[in-house]
Image: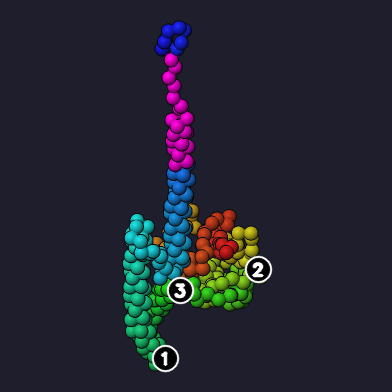
């Protein structure tokens, strides 16, 4: 403003307070955004780790449940959140499966026992009649049929017992000794069939049930001897690799077509549709269940010629 005589009036004010307020506002905004981001990252990391921990627990419980620990359950924290609800649902499913499996096993075991007792008595009476001189073709056929029924019942009982085996029953077992004992047991039978039986083993000790491991070896050997023609050969190998232990029984028989190998390992499966060959159709099923109980897998492959049945025990 001009005041005259070349004088001017200038009016001003200090802006330090406004600038200070602006700086503080920007600083507070930056720190709040940074704090929010850090808290969000930490919360997200914690929540994701919690989800992954639940998935790990569910996966471990599922593997143990599949391995035979039917009493396995997922932990419930009691928070009542979505993880607890999912865990409760899975535990209910596990409990229902356990109940159904126990019911089926009990019914199968009871039925097999109920059938075996009267059939054994009937066979005993036929034996007594034969000893008394009352022997004919009819009684011989009846005896053969009863023997086949009793073998089927025995195999059904073995299968039921194998399925009820728990990992808590495992003890260190010398698998090499089991294989050698089985070879000595089946060698005379192989000689009677005109077969060459060879073995190649390496020292192997693993956790398991001796009777079930012996059943695996016996069933695979019995199958190979049954279907290998005279003059053929059977080779049993027990080897250890980087990924575990493999027990293999290879023969030079007719083998099994690739599209029927999975079916051959199901219960009561008979590739001989006419049912003229002996057996209940449970041999490979029992071997497969016994292998599964031990965390192993049974696979059938071409031996060119013949069949190669291999049980692979994964390294633990």
The C terminus, quarter of image: bottom right
Depth check: give the residue in front, 232 or 255.
255
Query: Residues at badges 2 and 1 in contact (C-beta under 8 Å)?
Result: no
Residue hosting label 2: 201
Query: Residue at 49% of width from left, 72% of height from top?
Result: 167
The N terminus, quarter of image: top left
Q: Horizontal and vertical percent for residue 26?
A: 46, 34
Disc 1 to disc 3, C-alpha distance: 41 Å
Mark 3 or 2, closer to the camera: 3
Disc 3 to disc 2, C-alpha distance: 27 Å
Q: Is residue 313 left or right of residue 266?
A: right
Depth check: give the residue in front, 146 or 295.
295
The magenta-colored residue range is: 9-33
- Mark 2 Cα within 10 Å, few/some/many (few <14, many 20+)? some
Query: Residues at badges 3 and 2 in contact (C-beta under 8 Å)?
Result: no
Magenta span: chief secondary structure = helix
Secondary structure of residue under mark 1: helix
Mark number for residue 165? 3
Disc 2 to disc 1, C-alpha distance: 46 Å
Secondary structure of residue under mark 2: loop
Q: Splitting the image into 4 quarters, where does residue 116 fall?
A: bottom left
Q: Splitting the image into 4 quarters, where does residue 275 fall?
A: bottom left
Indicate yes or no whether the magenta region holds residue 24: yes
Q: Hey, which residue is sitting farthest top in the picture?
A: 5
Secondary structure of residue under mark 3: loop
Q: Is residue 243 visible?
A: yes
Mark 2 or 1, closer to the camera: 2
Q: Horizontal and vertical percent for residue 86?
A: 35, 58
């Amino acid at each position: 403003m001009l005041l005259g005589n070349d004088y001017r009036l200038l009016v001003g004010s200090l802006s330090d307070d406004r600038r200070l307020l602006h700086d503080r506002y920007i600083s507070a905004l930056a720190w709040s955004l940074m704090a929010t981001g850090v808290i969000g990252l930490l919360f997200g990391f914690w929540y994701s780790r919690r989800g992954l921990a639940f998935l790990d627990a569910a996966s471990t419980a599922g593997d143990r449940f599949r391995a035979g620990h039917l009493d396995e359950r997922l932990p419930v924290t009691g928070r009542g959140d979505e993880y607890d609800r999912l865990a409760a649902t899975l535990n209910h499913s596990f409990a229902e499966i356990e109940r159904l499996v126990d019911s089926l096993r009990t019914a199968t075991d009871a039925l097999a026992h109920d059938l075996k007792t009267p059939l054994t008595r009937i066979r005993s009476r036929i034996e007594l009649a034969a000893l008394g001189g009352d022997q004919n073709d009819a009684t011989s056929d009846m005896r053969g049929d009863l023997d086949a029924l009793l073998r089927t019942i025995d195999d059904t009982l073995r299968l039921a017992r194998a399925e009820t085996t728990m990992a808590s029953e495992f003890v260190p077992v010398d698998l090499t000794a089991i294989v050698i004992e089985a070879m000595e047991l089946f060698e005379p039978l192989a000689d009677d069939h005109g077969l060459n039986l060879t073995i190649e083993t390496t020292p192997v000790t693993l956790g398991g049930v001796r009777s079930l491991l012996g059943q695996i070896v016996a069933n695979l050997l019995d199958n190979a001897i049954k279907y290998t023609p005279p003059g053929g050969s059977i080779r049993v190998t027990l080897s250890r690799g980087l990924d575990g232990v493999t027990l293999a029984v290879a023969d030079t028989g007719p083998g099994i077509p690739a599209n029927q190998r999975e079916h051959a390992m199901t219960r009561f499966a008979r590739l001989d549709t006419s049912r003229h060959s002996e057996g209940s159709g449970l041999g490979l099923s029992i071997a497969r269940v016994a292998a599964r109980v031990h965390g192993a897998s049974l696979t059938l492959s071409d031996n060119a010629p013949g069949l190669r049945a291999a049980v692979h025990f994964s390294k633990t």
